């Protein structure tokens, strides 16, 4: 019975059902606030998908991700509030800015391996925070940026309303997920996974490590920038706290709970945890008392998260159903295949 | 001239604290190859434990320091047993994420009990010594002397005693250490205990001239990481020298360049160094 439900979830129809649910959600929601929370969750999910590219697929723990989110938000905020740009050019500007800065940071940081990379990016994230906080001439310091422009609807829609903005974010989320699903099936995505599984082996296969890692890093920071720009357009008031390291830690938790290196994991993890923290209001401040041990328990017992563990389970079950003789040939391939598609 | 000497004094104070924190971090890294992101949280818990023992229990500064060192040492050993030991065969990314988990947990727990406010810790050493215009608060002198004594004591322990030698042996060559019958679990627990105690003592020494609050470990731990990268991860003299470099860079940079950006100096230094030498300044070859 369980297996049948599970099999149903694996079908392409499940995706359509989820999308349909997301489309009608504003009509089902009890109030505008719920739509707002869902839009926020989608924005975080986009950023977590970015983190998944560099950390999940490519295996490099990037602790500056929250910093790039903030750079995206600040670029949009400052361009619209201080320099009089309208939303969409500033939006493109934010993407370009995070991509360029991602490239510069990536070129330096990705020469470092494992621990050095994590520590280096931790410091980069902190430098970003300090600059946003102290460079008052540019960023307004601790006061933050006000009067950020809302997305311009070309006279058709008004994005200052919650519901139209929700659909805008949903559109970007679907686009982001579609791109990742194409990426994970492509040669490039497989190259990233090869680097995660062993960079020396990957190099001996003729993979240019540096170029691919930098590409993965730039993609991930651009995702963070996209999420940051949308966030600034929605909240329309930002401060240096957007670059707080805790945002990066939140995103790592979302990623790990959902399933690192999987396709639907980031979305499930983010939506699940955002709604759980929302519904348990007292958790807002002390959520780390639960998130912290949760991270530890996850990496010890379920390093593959909800989606990864589910895939392993379904694979084992379906193996058990296959008669003894036929099992051999299908032993290795399905998990890898399923892992990259789910 | 006096201003210059004053900055040297500040550099020595900062360098001593950073060195102590970095020592614990580098010891753990040398033995287990874990960059312990939770080390800053242990430092913070150390300060709060001393504060708790002094204010709520009412013991003397020295006993509070000893008590806090013992509590944090036990806490660090528990972390090793419950978290890092089960993960010893996992991919390196898991250790780092688990360490972040511990960090988040400890911070949240402390914040639940004590709130996020800044607290001031008192110390029996409030006097100020005046050497012909050069003003040295007693607490700063205590920090420098305390750090020197601890480093010397640790050196004697590591070099002259059998138990200490097992730590050095395991840092030098893991397999070799197993071959001669060194118990890896014991060494790992001992190392975590020492690193926790060092962090707690450093926090208790520094807290009276700084403040006590749940996020106090953030900057210190990041600087400690910068230091052990500078000094070569796992190297004990490297941690001390690196601590002094960062301490002096901050004292002089903060004074002569800009106070607002003094925290960036350490990280800027790291970015420059790692861009030129990805393996750190004093690292011995590749692993």
Image (cartoon, grey):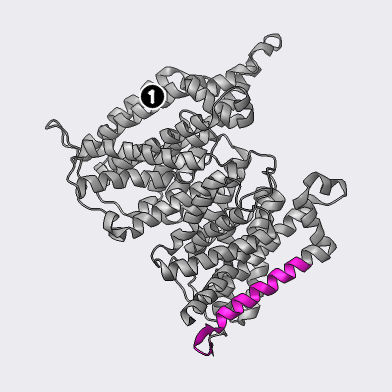
Q: Element type at marker 1?
A: helix
Check disc 1: other Cα within 10 Å, few if <14, some if 14-19, many if 20+: few
Picture residue at 44% right of the left edge, 68% below the top: B254
Q: Is residue A309 above or below residue A287?
A: above
Tell me if residue A7 can be seen. yes
Taking depth in this image into account, of A263 and B269 the one nearest to the observer is B269
Judged left or right of residue B15, residue A159 is: left
Residue B138 % position (x, y): 56, 84
Residue B107 % position (x, y): 51, 59
Q: Main secondary structure of the magenta part?
A: helix
Residue ranking furthest to the front: B1
Q: Which residues are magenta?
A: B127-156
Picture residue at 56% right of the left edge, 80% below the top: B139
Judged left or right of residue B184, residue B223 is: left
Specify the quadrant that holds the N terminus of chain A.
top right
Taking depth in this image into account, of B15 and B119 the one nearest to the observer is B15
Q: Badge 1 is on which residue?
A: A178
Picture residue at 59% right of the left edge, 76% below the top: B53
Residue B151 inside the magenta-drawn segment: yes
Residue ranking furthest to the right: B180
Q: Write down the quadrant of residue B90 in the picture.
A: top right
Tell me if residue A279 can be seen. no
Residue B144 inside the magenta-drawn segment: yes
The subunit carrying tag 1 is A
Taking depth in this image into account, of A234 and B144 the one nearest to the observer is B144
Q: Is residue A178 above or below residue B74?
A: above
């Amino acid at each position: 019975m369980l297996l049948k439900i599970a099999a149903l979830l694996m079908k392409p129809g499940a995706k359509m059902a989820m999308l349909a649910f997301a489309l009608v959600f504003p009509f089902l929601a009890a109030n505008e606030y719920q739509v707002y929370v869902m839009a926020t969750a989608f924005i975080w999910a986009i950023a977590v998908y970015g983190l998944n590219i560099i950390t999940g697929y490519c295996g490099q723990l990037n602790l500056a991700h929250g910093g790039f989110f903030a750079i995206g938000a600040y670029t949009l905020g400052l361009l619209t509030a201080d320099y009089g740009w309208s939303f969409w050019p500033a939006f493109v500007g934010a993407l370009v800015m995070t991509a360029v800065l991602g490239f510069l940071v990536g070129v330096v940081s990705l020469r470092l391996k494992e621990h050095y990379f994590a520590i280096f990016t931790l410091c980069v994230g902190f430098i970003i925070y300090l600059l946003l906080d102290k460079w008052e001439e540019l960023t307004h310091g601790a006061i933050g940026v006000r009067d950020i422009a809302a997305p311009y609807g070309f006279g058709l829609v008004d994005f200052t309303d919650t519901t139209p903005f929700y659909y805008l974010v949903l559109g970007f989320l679907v686009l982001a997920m579609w791109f990742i699903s194409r990426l994970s099936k492509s040669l490039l995505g497989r190259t990233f996974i090869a680097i995660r599984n062993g960079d020396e082996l990957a190099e001996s296969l003729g993979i240019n490590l540096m170029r691919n890692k930098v590409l993965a890093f730039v993609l991930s920071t651009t995702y963070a920038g996209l999420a940051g720009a949308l966030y600034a357009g929605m909240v329309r008031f930002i401060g240096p706290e957007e670059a707080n390291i805790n945002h990066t830690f939140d995103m790592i938790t979302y990623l790990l709970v959902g399933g690192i290196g999987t396709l639907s994991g980031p979305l499930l993890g983010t939506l699940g945890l955002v709604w759980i923290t929302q519904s348990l209001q007292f958790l807002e401040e002390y959520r780390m008392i639960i998130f912290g041990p949760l991270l530890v328990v996850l990496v010890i017992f379920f390093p593959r998260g909800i989606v990864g563990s589910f895939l392993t389970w379904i694979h084992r079950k379906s193996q058990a159903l296959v008669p003894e003789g036929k099992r051999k040939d299908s032993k290795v391939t399905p998990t890898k295949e399923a892992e990259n598609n789910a | 001239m006096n201003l210059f000497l004053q900055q040297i004094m500040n550099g020595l104070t900062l360098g001593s604290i950073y060195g102590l924190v970095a020592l614990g971090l580098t010891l753990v890294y040398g033995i287990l190859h874990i960059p312990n992101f939770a080390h800053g949280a242990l430092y913070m818990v150390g300060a709060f434990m001393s504060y708790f023992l002094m204010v709520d229990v009412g013991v003397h500064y020295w006993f509070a320091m000893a008590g806090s060192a013992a509590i944090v040492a036990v806490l660090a050993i528990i972390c090793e047993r419950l978290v890092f030991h089960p993960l010893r065969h996992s991919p390196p990314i898991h250790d780092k994420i688990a360490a972040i988990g511990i960090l988040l947990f400890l911070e949240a727990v402390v914040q639940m009990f004590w709130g996020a406010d800044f607290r001031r810790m008192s110390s029996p050493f409030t006097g100020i010594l005046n050497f012909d215009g050069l003003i040295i608060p007693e607490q700063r002198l205590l920090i420098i002397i305390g750090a020197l004594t601890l480093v010397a004591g640790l050196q004697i322990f590591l070099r002259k005693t059998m138990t200490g030698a097992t730590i050095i042996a395991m840092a030098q060559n893991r397999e070799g250490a197993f071959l001669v019958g060194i118990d890896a679990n014991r060494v790992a627990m001992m190392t975590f205990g020492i690193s926790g105690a060092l962090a707690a003592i450093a926090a208790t020494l520094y807290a009276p001239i700084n403040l006590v609050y749940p996020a106090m470990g953030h900057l210190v731990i990041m600087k400690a990481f910068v230091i052990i990268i500078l000094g070569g991860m796992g190297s004990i003299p490297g941690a001390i020298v690196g601590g002094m470099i960062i301490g002096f860079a901050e004292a002089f940079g903060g004074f002569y360049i800009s106070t607002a950006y003094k925290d960036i100096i350490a990280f800027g230094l790291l970015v420059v160094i790692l861009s030129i030498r990805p393996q750190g300044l004093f690292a011995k070859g590749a692993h």
